[in-house]
Amino acid sequence: MTGGAYSISEDVTPAGQGAPPHIHRRELETFIVLEGEYEFQCGDRKFKATKGAIVVLPREVPHAFKNTGNTIGKTLVVLVPGGMEKVFEDISAMPPGPPDIGKVNAITTKYGVEFLPIG
């Protein structure tokens, strides 16, 4: 256990998928690309990242990412401080089937993550 100092998870991202623009109010987020080709956006900057790249995304800055390759991508994600794992625990406790976006937004907001309009 880290005592809440940080959390680490492996993220598997199908080709063409990723996370839409959002802001972490609490965490600094670091991605270490293990496999695949990604495009990250941090604020107004867009950049590519491939195997071995380390991408640091500060808190309070809008960011997004997408696996732009043709194969599954993998990243190691480190969040400081820890606690974001609770978002995934709460979402996974929702009933099976298509997610209720309103409930998902309520969960993410509870943990300081705000999804932004796309476009």
Image: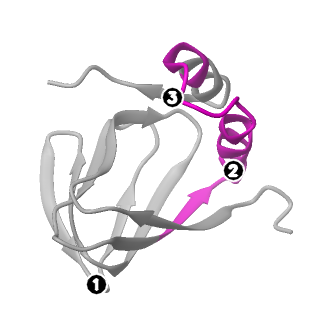
Give the side of residue 32 with respect to residue 108, left or right: left
> The magenta stretch spans which residues?
76-104
Q: Which mark is residue 98?
A: 3
Type of amino acid under label 1: Lys
As helix, strand or loop, the secondary structure at mark 3 comes to: loop
Q: Which mark is residue 39?
A: none
Nearer-N-terminus badge (3/2): 2
| Residue wearing tag 2 | 85
Residue drawn at point x = 69 percent, y = 61 percent: 6
x and y, in percent, of residue 93 in the image: 75, 36
x and y, in percent, of residue 44 in the image: 14, 40
Q: CA distance from mark 3 to mark 2?
A: 21 Å
Type of amino acid under label 2: Glu
Image: 23 above or below 10: above
Please state, as top left, top right, bottom left or bottom right, where the N terminus lies in the image. bottom right
Q: Residues within 10 Å of mark 2 (few under 14, many from 20)?
A: few
| Residue wearing tag 1 | 51
Is 78 colored magenta in this rendering? yes
Residue drawn at point x = 48 percent, y = 55 percent: 29
x and y, in percent, of residue 3 in the image: 86, 60
Nearer-N-terminus badge (1/2): 1
As helix, strand or loop, the secondary structure at mark 2 comes to: helix
Please state, as top left, top right, bottom left or bottom right, where the C terminus lies in the image. top left
Instruction: Single out the mark in the foreground, 3 or 2.
Output: 3
Nearer-N-terminus badge (3/1): 1
Type of amino acid under label 3: Pro
Image: 83 above or below 69: above
Q: CA distance from mark 3 to mark 1?
A: 32 Å
Residue drawn at point x = 65 percent, y = 46 percent: 84
Instruction: Single out the mark in the foreground, 3 or 1.
Output: 3
As helix, strand or loop, the secondary structure at mark 1 comes to: loop
